[in-house]
Amino acid sequence: MGLVSSGIDRIRAVGLAAGVRAGGGAINEPFSVLIKWRSEHEDKLHQIYVNGVLAGVTTDVQQRQMIVSIPLHTNSAVRIEVYAVEASEANFDFSGRLQSRPQSGRVNISWFRSMSLPLEGTAQVYSDGASGEIDYDKPASKEDIQLWPSRQDKFGFGLGPFGEGDFGYEGSAAVGFGIGLFGEGEFGFDADQVSWVSSELETGKYRFAVKVTDRFGNESDAQETNEITVIRPATPAHGLKVDSYDKAEGRLVLCIS
């Protein structure tokens, strides 16, 4: 059946106090929030997703609140979603089916981990920093991206170099046969992908490139992306307080202190 979003409303995120100051003010715990909601689904469990990632599952059909962990963002809001699910699907991660949304000004670069990529090879990502010209002297990736660190992951079915493989056991740890991106590459292999996510970027137009280096230091030609537009989400409002609330008219007036 999958995720059910209808019939769920009044979702609220409440900060948790980690302590109390001498004057009585609370010291908030920054990495966790209490999520409360109202739901008409009396026969289903509920899942909570934080920024598109499964963060929690209820254990009872009557449960309407849960504490979940959240990332610490200073410049963008955290997106929290609550869905109803059948009990038989409660522990199934549906994050791949959620509507794709911006990653708080981040860019995701991914490519298939092809069998043609070198054993013990690494990849480096470069960026133009919104300047228009890619800087190949300074990688945007803080660490080299490992491609095929072990021959047992790479070769299989007798395809490994003679005397270097495990004859019959090669490829035993490889991703494939319905796992990952099965069907996009060689049967049983090339079924997974390599992904790199940038740090938070300012609004602008960026270009990226990827180079592959083998274990002997040989470097491939750069594979460049098209121009990618990054638009930072609006900065969350701070200091909001309730000025007045008219229950009869359903009107809420907020003010910024």
Image (spheres, grey):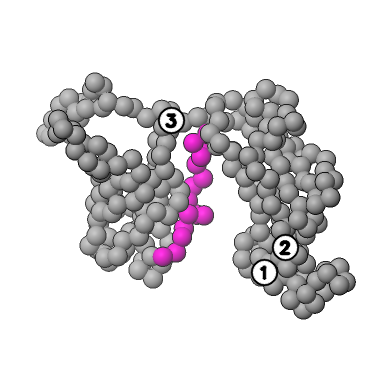
Residue visible at 79% across and 46% down?
213
In screen coordinates, is 64 left or right of 84?
Answer: left
Residue at the image point whose x is 34% and y is 27% from the top: 237
Report if residue 153 lies within the magenta region. Answer: no
Residue 54: x and y, percent?
43, 55
Amino acid type, callout 3: Asn
Q: Over which residues does the magenta segment extend?
A: 91-105
Residue 97 belongs to the span the image colors magenta: yes
Residue in the picture at 24% in, 60% down: 63
**Residue 225 shows in this picture:** no
User: Which label belongs to residue 150?
Assistant: 2
Q: Main secondary structure of the magenta part?
A: loop
Q: CA distance from mark 1 to mark 3?
A: 40 Å
Marks 2 & 1, CB-CB < 8 Å contact: yes
The mark that comes first in sequence, 2 or 1, is 2
Residue sitting farthest toward the bottom: 168
Looking at the rendered structure, which numbered label has been put on residue 75? Answer: 3
Q: Earlier in the sequence, mark 1 or mark 3?
A: 3
Find the residue positioned furthest to the front: 22
Q: Nearer the viewer, mark 3 or mark 2?
A: 2
**What percent of the width, then of the height, locates residue 80?**
37, 45
Q: Are marks 1 and 3 in contact (CB under 8 Å)?
A: no
Q: Earlier in the sequence, mark 3 or mark 2?
A: 3
Distance from the alpha carbon under mark 2 to that under mark 1: 9 Å
